[in-house]
Amino acid sequence: MESKGELRKHINTFFNPKRLCRVHYLKWVLTDPDWSIRYFWVFDTKSEYARSWVLKSHSRKAYIVLSQSEALDFIRYRGTHNNPIEIHGVYAKGKYHKQIIEH
């Protein structure tokens, strides 16, 4: 059995911001499958995108921040459907483990 101090130290490693690489966003698929619109609630490794609308190129791994109006226009005119996919992800053991929720 671990001592209380050892247990606390072990548990605190799970609160280390460098260890927590979480992502939570809504994703709208566009007619060009290389591009998608995302609204990020959480993006630990790229915090500048949190609470932002983003146009993402999957092949280039490029992100372009959009205004809400621009994002809605992309969804309206280029989206394959209005319902997003909700994604919760955690980076662990060298890759993202994602849970996908289709609305």
Image (tube, rainbow, N blue to C red):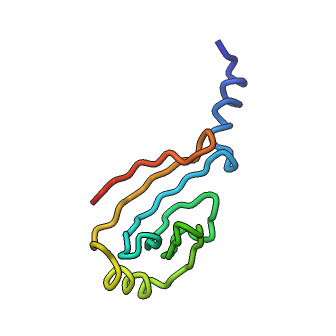
- Vertically, is 73 above or below 58? below
Q: Quadrant of residue 50?
A: bottom right
Left of 6 or right of it: where is 83? left
The residue located at (42%, 81%) in the rendering is 71
- Vertically, is 24 above or below 7? below
Q: Quadrant of the N terminus?
A: top right
Q: Quadrant of residue 63?
A: bottom right
In this view, the residue in front, 75 or 6, is 75
In this view, the residue in front, 17 or 54, is 54
Left of 60 or right of it: where is 28? left
Residue 55: percent from left, percent from top: 50, 76
The residue located at (46%, 73%) in the rendering is 35
Left of 91 or right of it: where is 27? left
The residue located at (51%, 71%) in the rendering is 51
Left of 100 or right of it: where is 60? right
Q: Quadrant of the C terminus?
A: bottom left
In this view, the residue in front, 47 or 73, is 73
Number of labels in the image equals: 0
The residue located at (41%, 48%) in the rendering is 99
Residue 82: percent from left, percent from top: 28, 73
Q: Residue furthest top?
A: 1
Residue 40: percent from left, percent from top: 49, 66
- Vertically, is 21 above or below 10? below
